[in-house]
Amino acid sequence: MSSCLKEKVVVITGASSGIGLECARLFGSEGACLVLAARSEDKLLALSAELVSTPVLIVAADVSLEKDCKRLIEKTVERFGRIDILVNNAGLSMRALFRDLDLNVIRRLMDVNFWGCVYCTKYALPWLLERKGSVVGVTSIAGFKGLPARTGYSASKFAMNGFLDTLRTEHLYDGLHVMTFAPGFTASNVRYSALTADGSRQGETPRAEDRMMTAREVARHMLRGIIKRKDFVILTPVGKATVFLSKFCPRLVSRLEYRMMASEPDSPLRPRREAGK
């Protein structure tokens, strides 16, 4: 994959940590010109200082705000004059039963996960079409099969999947590449920053992060998917099995999901034996 992104202009949202950060490092090593967006300007500055061998533009932006997304694209074009790849990676998770959930939590997740993708794609689209470039949406297995205690997260990812699928079909014959990218469980900070029922941050992860695919591995898979211009990339054996089996035996998959999520420490789901009472 050496130099496959040489001088390509790549915009990455949520670039200050996790998958976005590792994409920045990897894509930069492949010769890309990087535009890195996140809310934390300090973290972006630290990352920029690390990426000394590639042109980097950092833009402090909250993707839930349309004006920030518009400004991100404007600054990109002002600096580089083009956009080749847009990676809609910024995302937020949650962990709570819907019956206990403050509805503002779902609104927040839709604003970040879904509307952030829509806003950035809308303003970048003319430039991407000009370059026959790539739109990447980092979604989730939870966007293919609803995940219990993640109602807002699943809903936002289902919405992303529908948006990307429709966009792909609309531009089937004009060279735009649209990739739905579902990593599965990945070692990142997404569970630490996940929202609880009242909207406060979880602050810890209920899962064994050291057993998950690393963000660096995920970035490599994304790069391969972009190079091959794949429509869908679904990662991890569990992720692939979930998506496949949910088409044919959704009830079984629901039971397995329930059992898995109920086994988490302090899970809001009742243990299986109690649920059957």
Image (cartoon, rainbow, N blue to C red):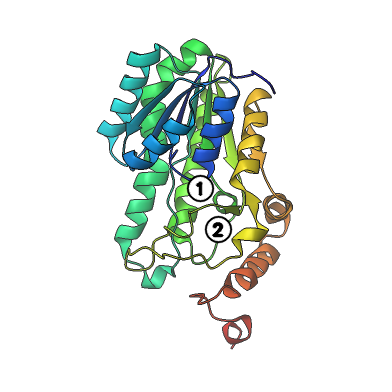
Residue 248 in the figure: left or right of residue 229: right
Q: Residue furthest left?
A: 67
Residue identified by numbered label 2: 146
Whether tag 1 and tag 2 are in contact, CB under 8 A, the answer is yes
**In what element is the residue under mark 1?**
helix
Please identify the quadrant where the N terminus is shown.
Answer: top right
Residue 238 in the figure: left or right of residue 140: right
Q: Residue flagged by tag 2: what amino acid is it?
A: Gly
Residue at 37%, 63% in the rendered image: 201
Q: Residue 120's spot in the image, x, y percent?
A: 38, 30
Residue 215 in the figure: left or right of residue 48: right
- Identify the mark at residue 158; answer none if there is no mark: 1
Vertical placement of 236 versus 103: above or below?
A: above
**In what element is the residue under mark 2?**
loop
Q: Residue 52's spot in the image, x, y percent?
A: 48, 25
Q: Residue 138's spot in the image, x, y percent?
A: 53, 40
Total marks in image: 2
Q: Does the rendering let one see residue 117?
A: yes
Q: Does the rendering let one see residue 138?
A: no
Q: Residue flagged by tag 1: what amino acid is it?
A: Phe
